[in-house]
Image: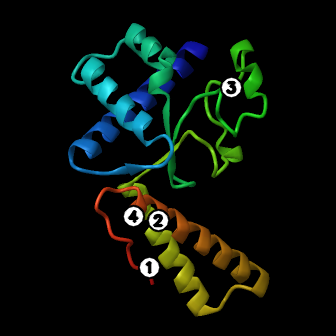
Amino acid sequence: MLEVLDQEKGLTLAETLTEAGERIAAGETVSGPAADRYRAAAAEFSDRYAGTYLGKRELRALVANPRLQVYEDPKAFLTCNHDAFTALCTPDRDRARDGGRSTPDHSRCHPACANISRTDSQITMLRAEVARIDAAAEASFDPYPVAAREQQRRTHLIDIIHRHHAQQPGADDPEEPR
């Protein structure tokens, strides 16, 4: 059973890195503390595995390569370029050598983590989420505590969007989504 799970993990990594390489080749930009690692992982995967058959051995090598540990988290609008030694989602990261988590814990994702990168596609999804929050606020259906939390979340999401654009060369600060 574990062999099947490792194969699935390898296939998911391959799909994620293939899509990353295609988006970067199409001009998509990447921001965040791990942006360089994200681009490097996509390039390494493309150079080494693109267009080849991924058998059990290749999938095991892919899963074992620490530079290729890239995990999309659509709910958090980010990509984790997982490094168990620096991951803030891993409370026992100092013991990572002794069997610590080899994958990120998305339920404990921390916004200050050095493993985070964001793509233009994720920023587009963030903008849609901000628009959803704005529509809900305009409809005024949420009770005050929920509406207040959503406005705090909106402020946080807008900050992420601005930081993404600030890291792009020659980019102007975008208008705030309405």
Along the polypeptide, which appears first: circle 1 or circle 3?
Answer: 3
Residue 1 seen anywhere in this rendered image of the structure: no
Q: Are marks 2 and 1 in contact (CB under 8 Å)?
A: yes
Report the residue marked by disc 1: 177
Report the residue marked by disc 4: 124
Image point (28%, 46%), residue name: 23
- Name the spot of residue 123 as percent of width and height, x first: 42, 61
Q: The residue tagged with tag 2: helix, strand or loop?
A: helix
> Within 10 angstroms of label 2, few (less than 14), some, or many (20 or more) residues?
many
Mark identifier at residue 161? 2
- Name the spot of residue 1 as percent of width and height, x first: 60, 15
Mark identifier at residue 101? 3
Q: Amino acid at mark 4?
A: Thr
* Foreground: disc 1 or disc 3: 1
Along the polypeptide, which appears first: circle 1 or circle 4?
Answer: 4
Nearer the observer, 69 or 139? 69
Q: Amino acid at mark 1?
A: Pro
Image point (72%, 75%), residue name: 149
Q: CA distance from mark 1 to mark 3?
A: 37 Å
Along the polypeptide, which appears first: circle 3 or circle 4?
Answer: 3
Q: Is residue 145 above or below residue 29?
A: below
As drawn, the residue found furthest toward the front would be: 170
Q: How many marks?
A: 4
Q: Quadrant of residue 108?
A: top right
Q: CA distance from mark 1 to mark 4?
A: 11 Å
* Foreground: disc 4 or disc 2: 2
> Within 10 angstroms of label 3, few (less than 14), some, or many (20 or more) residues?
many
Along the polypeptide, which appears first: circle 2 or circle 3?
Answer: 3
